[in-house]
Image: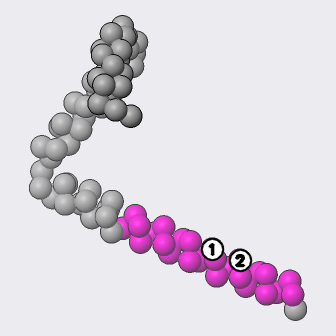
Amino acid sequence: MSRRDEDDLLRQLHELPSEEPERELAARVQRRAHAALESSHAPPWRTAAAQTWTRVALPAALTVTVVGYLSWAIGAANALYR
């Protein structure tokens, strides 16, 4: 794509009419944004707990669950072949 083609494409893009989102969607997005903003000003212990959960505890719990299921599935498959 040449520079001129890109410029024409951008010009056409800017000419497209803008569309406003539905009121319910806009309100839901605004509520989520406000909740995210408020949670960013949470006490330090709450922020640390949330980070620990999302970065350590949740992945560890999922790993344990997957490994447990795989060991059970392999044991069940072995039992079928015996």
Question: Which residue: 38% across, 34% down?
Answer: 1
In the rendered structure, which amino acid carries the disc numbered 2?
Answer: Ala
Q: Quadrant of residue 28?
A: top left
Q: CA distance from mark 2 to mark 1?
A: 6 Å
Q: Position of residue 46 (x, y in %)?
A: 19, 54
| 77 inside magenta stretch | yes
- Along the line of sight, which residue is nearer the eye, 27 or 14? 14
Q: Give, as a single range, the part of the protein colored magenta.
A: 57-81
For disc 1, the marked residue is 69
| 69 inside magenta stretch | yes
- Please tell me whether the stretch drawn in magenta is mainly helix, strand or loop: helix
For label 2, the crowd category at 10 Å Cα-Cα, with few meaning under 14, some 14 to 19 and many 20 or more, is few
For disc 2, the marked residue is 73
Question: Which residue: 25% across, 59% down?
Answer: 51
Give the residue at the far bottom of this rendering: 82
Please say whether residue 6 is visible from this viewpoint: yes
Q: Position of residue 67 (x, y in %)?
A: 56, 77
In the rendered structure, which amino acid carries the disc numbered 1?
Answer: Tyr
